[in-house]
Image (tube, rainbow, N blue to C red):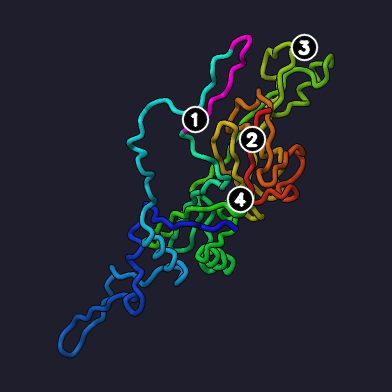
Amino acid sequence: MPSPQSFGGGSGGRDSDDDDEDGPSEDRESWFAGGERSGISIQNPDRARGVPGGNMVRDLLRRAAEAGPPPVAMGSEHRANVFTGGGHTLGSDEVPSTFIPDPDAEENDGTEETAIRHLTFWRDGFTVEDGDLMRYDDPNNEQILAEINSGRAPPSILNVLPGQPVELRVAKHTDEDYVAPKRTGFSGSGNRLGAPVPGGDSSQASGSSMPGSFPSSSSPAPSSEGARESISTKFEVDQSKPTTSIQIRLADGTRMVCRMNLTHTVLDIRNFINASRPENLTRPYSIGTTFPNRTLDNNTQTVESAGLLNSVIVQRWV
């Protein structure tokens, strides 16, 4: 399991040690008002009852407060705006060009890049990045918090490789209930032009439309929308059935998170990519997992059978 090497206080919340006092101070402060023979007890509304989630959450917030904000790289703001790096010498017919490495380049010691993850505590649970709410009263979630507090965070929760170092940044919103962001379904279309087989009848091509295919030069361009069949890439997530989050890293460096049922297929993942990047319909690519490296070439395989629960999928140009 990856080991969080540092805790950092996140933004968007009050100081982490506002409610970290132990003992009776966690209860609301009581005031008394009245006359000689009667009176009423009034609780101070500004005093919190304690941190939701119990001692485990309190310890994590305290550690984040003690760690302070993330460190700033020394001298990064004073870095000179000049060219640095390696280069090639000018070659000739007799002498080939050679590569000259950057003498100031840092040596790669083979260590994994430190991943930065954001842990947010709410009144009714906690979230990692933009994932779903994990409630405090769920025993499985209590175990997750215990593992994070002990420095052995589950890779599937933090979406990192086993053994990869993690910097965990904590945000405190324990005075707010979690509100799920509005998720909107996506839609898009793709068209396959021409016959599926060279020399085939163009009338058969409309029945073989599929996303990500290329136009055929042997077939004439369609004259109307009726000559082409639109491929809908919209699918709906059934919240009553098991779901999972899949992180998709596009070839252009963009990262997206797709929420899917376990019965969705590899083709649905491709359709999700094509809908978000319509230009992918005219350029071949492959998708696959990162650990271990495995190409997903069976479009009918389901998310569950392909072992893609809480996985990372990478798009690569072919």
Q: Is residue 203 above or below residue 295?
A: above
**Badge 1, how many Cα within 10 Å: few under 14, some, many 20+?**
few
Q: Secondary structure at mark 4?
A: loop
Q: Quadrant of residue 252?
A: top right
Residue under pointer 2: 315
On the image, the x and y values in percent for residue 159 come to 58, 51
N-terminal of the pair, mark 1 or mark 2, is: 1
The numbered mark, 2 or 4, whose residue comes first in the sequence reads 4
Q: Nearer the viewer, residue 180 or 147?
A: 147
Q: Nearer the viewer, residue 222 or 247?
A: 247
Q: Badges 4 and 3: C-beta atoms under 8 Å apart?
A: no
Instruction: Identify the amino acid type marked 2.
Output: Gln
Residue at image position (73%, 39%) is 296
Q: Is residue 176 above or below residue 110?
A: below
| In this rendering, position of residue 157 left or right of residue 207 | left
Circle on res. 102? 1
Q: Which residue is mark 3?
A: 218
What is the CA distance from the residue labelled 2 to the residue labelled 3?
A: 30 Å
Q: Which residue is mark 4?
A: 161
Say if mark 1 contacts mark 2, CB within 8 Å.
no
Q: Earlier in the sequence, mark 2 or mark 3?
A: 3
Mark 1–mark 3 Cα distance, whole angstroms, equals: 51 Å
Magenta-span inclusion, residue 120 = no
